[in-house]
Amino acid sequence: MFRSAPGVERARDIIERMGERQISTSPANYEVWTTHVAGVKPDLSREIEARLQRGEQFADEANEELFERFFANTRLSIQMLETSETIARELDDTVSNLRSAGGQAGSYAKVLQDAATRFEGGVDSAEFRSVVEHLAVTTHEMIENNLKLAEQIAPGAGTANGPGEREGRGADGWSDRPR
């Protein structure tokens, strides 16, 4: 319908018709008038013809109203709606992940507090070893959870040097620097 020389002629005709009515050549207006001239949406064409018979002017507001009424479900509108829904889902996931991270941080703080309390009371070597092993396990879990959260919030965050590695840190997340 709009290919090759006949398509170019049809486009010129549409622009001429728009120019005769002093309609600005915005993409939305062009879509309205292209659809009308092509006869793709009979309801739109009937509406435009009725307005022409009444002698109405097609100011920007009138064209915007026609566009909204007849093209609200166009590909672009659908893409915008889908994009909005995707963003809303991602925000919901992020908020959920942040809440979860807050709960994990609270649990980790409790583990640290419990360890400090146990150390304050004095511990033998076996209990010391048990507390330190528990701290090491929960610390590694916290590191993993934080790395996962960083990946979910900003893909690529925390992986500047490769999977699990960050500048100044080894693959296990601990410092490589001598103490």
Image (cartoon, helix red, strand yellow):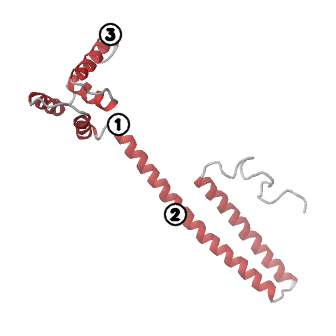
Quadrant in which the C terminus appears:
bottom right
Q: Residue furthest top?
A: 5
- Is residue 50 depicted above or below 142 in this figure? above
1 sits left or right of 176 in the view: left
Q: Residues within 10 Å of mark 3 (few under 14, many from 20)?
A: few
Q: What distance separates the C-alpha of mark 2 from that of mark 1?
A: 31 Å
Is the C-beta separation of discs 1 and 3 under 8 Å?
Answer: no
Residue extending farthest to the bottom is 121
**Disc 1: CA contacts within 10 A as few (<14), some (14-19) or many (>=20):** few
Which mark sits nearer the N-terminus, 2 or 3? 3
Determine the residue positioned at 23% across, 33% down: 59
Query: Would you identify the image quadrant in which residue 140 lies?
Result: bottom right
Mark 2 and 3 residues: CB-CB less than 8 Å, in contact? no
Q: Position of residue 120 (x, y in %)?
A: 80, 86
User: Could you tell me the amino acid type at mark 1?
Assistant: Arg
Check disc 1 and report its element: helix, strand or loop: helix
Rendered image: mark on residue 96: 2
Measure the C-alpha gap from mark 2 to mark 3.
Answer: 56 Å
Instruction: Tell which residue pokes out farthest to the right in this image.
Output: 178
At horizontal 80% and vertical 89% (from top left) the residue drawn is 121
Report the residue at 69% width, 52% height from top. Answer: 158
Q: Quadrant of the N terminus?
A: top left
Amino acid type, residue under disc 3 in the picture: Ala
Mark 1 lies on residue: 75
Q: Which mark is residue 5?
A: 3
Whichever of labels 2 and 1 marks the residue nearer the N terminus, that label is: 1
